[in-house]
Amino acid sequence: MSNVLVFFDVLGETLSFTQRELIAQAQSLGEVHIAIGAYQGDPTPALAISGVGEVYLAEASLPAPEVAVVDLLETAVAECGAEVILGSSTADVTDALARLAVRLDTGIICSIAALTGELLATKSELAGSYTTVSQLAPGLSRPLIATFRPNSLDPQRVDALLDAGDQPDGTVLPVRPSQGGVEVLHREALKVSARPALAEARVVVAGGRGVDGDFTPLEELADELGAGLGASRAATDAGWIEHAAQVGQTGVTVSPQLYISAGISGAVQQRSGMQTAGTIVAINKDEDAPVFEIADFGVVGDLHEVIPQMIEELRRRKG
Ligand SMILES: Cc1cc2nc3c(=O)[nH]c(=O)nc-3n(C[C@H](O)[C@H](O)[C@H](O)COP(=O)(O)OP(=O)(O)OC[C@H]3O[C@@H](n4cnc5c(N)ncnc54)[C@H](O)[C@@H]3O)c2cc1C
């Protein structure tokens, strides 16, 4: 069994599903400790889970892209003797953990789906063409750093694995920002969306060129389903939706339980960012569109007719 340090770049009043999933993954490897970047007030009540050991914080909250979070992580690794450091495979967490890997002169494996007790990491590569198993080069007595693809575990399994426990104590670590680092001169928060973050969403509704400039029906469907909103590159390049919504090879990689693709042809660069989704529903008016090759359910039709019907049916079922 290993000492595992789990990194949350931000922790609110309650744990997100992805954060609970990460703790469940970590518990299968050994004793779990947690380091938190950004927080408000006392973040420890949210971590009252059986088996959670130390919780490490800096004196002041360290929101991304605060590079000093790497100093916090380095100190926390030394404090708990972490042999494994885990985070979610979001951009901010990957950024911080990659910097930590350089600092500790060790390896990082990104976007894994599973990690065994022998520290063998499984991940999908090259648009799902290969499944690879990797490990830290043998003989190195350095910790393994890995980021987990969200939504790899069944929610019921996560609930079954995590029991309520005592509220852990928070340990405030002195963080002395390293010399020669980056100084953040200006920070402007993105417009906060009520929708779940794309990379972590359990349901994603995505639109492409077929949306023809109007994402309103997709937004409505996303809100009915509590889903994140994504897009193809054709849609983001056209300026119909922000670039942060792009799913694919040069965009965000998502792995939701349900991915609804509307008006997207299913080019390989789009697929590489979404084809590990649990269930894929494709809506396209061209029955030969490549997206139907990977879809579990397909609707051949005009999305401007199909999506309003889906919304109507969802509302009817909700009563
Ligand atoms: C290096 C590189 C990186 C790339 N990275 C990405 C990436 O990260 N993500 C990405 O998405 N792409 C990426 N691309 C672009 C990719 O190759 C495709 O060009 C892009 O995904 C196409 O977007 P689309 O499916 O929305 O548009 P199109 O290929 O034009 O397809 C539109 C689809 O909508 C359907 N349609 C039209 N009207 C309707 C309607 N009313 N109702 C239903 N269906 C309709 C059409 O039948 C068609 O299948 C990359 C390309 C390169 C070269």
Image (tube, rainbow, N blue to C red):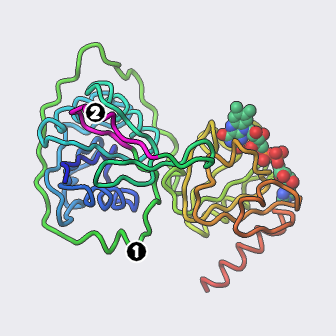
Kind of residue indicated by mark 1: Gln
Element at label 1: helix
Prevailing SS of the magenta stretch: loop
Is ligand 1 within 8 Å of the beta carbon of the residue shown at mark 1?
Answer: no
* Corner quadrant of residue 103: top left
Residue under the point 33% across and 54% down: 116
Q: Quadrant of residue 238?
A: top right
Q: Amino acid at mark 2?
A: Val
Of the numbered discs 2 and 1, the one sitting upstream in the chain is: 2
Q: Position of residue 40 (x, y in %)?
A: 26, 48
What are the residue bounds of the magenta stretch? Answer: 133-146
Image quadrant in which you'd find residue 240: top right
Residue 32 image point, x, y percent: 20, 54
- Is residue 57 found left or right of 285 in the rendered image? left
Q: Is residue 268 left or right of residue 102?
A: right
For mark 1, what is the residue?
Answer: 156
In the rendered image, the vertical position of residue 247 relative to residue 226, given as above or below = above
Residue 300 among those drawn in magenta: no
Query: Which is more foreground, mark 2 or mark 1?
Result: 1
Which quadrant is home to the C terminus? bottom right
Identified at 86% across, 66% down, the residue is: 301
Is residue 89 at all visible to an observer of this figure? yes
Left or right of residue 239: residue 67: left
From the top left corner, tell me how far across and down residue 256 is, in percent: 55, 59
Which residue does the numbered mark 2 point to in the structure image?
A: 69
> Image point 33% across, 37% down: which residue?
136
Q: Which quadrant of the rendered structure holds the N terminus?
A: bottom left
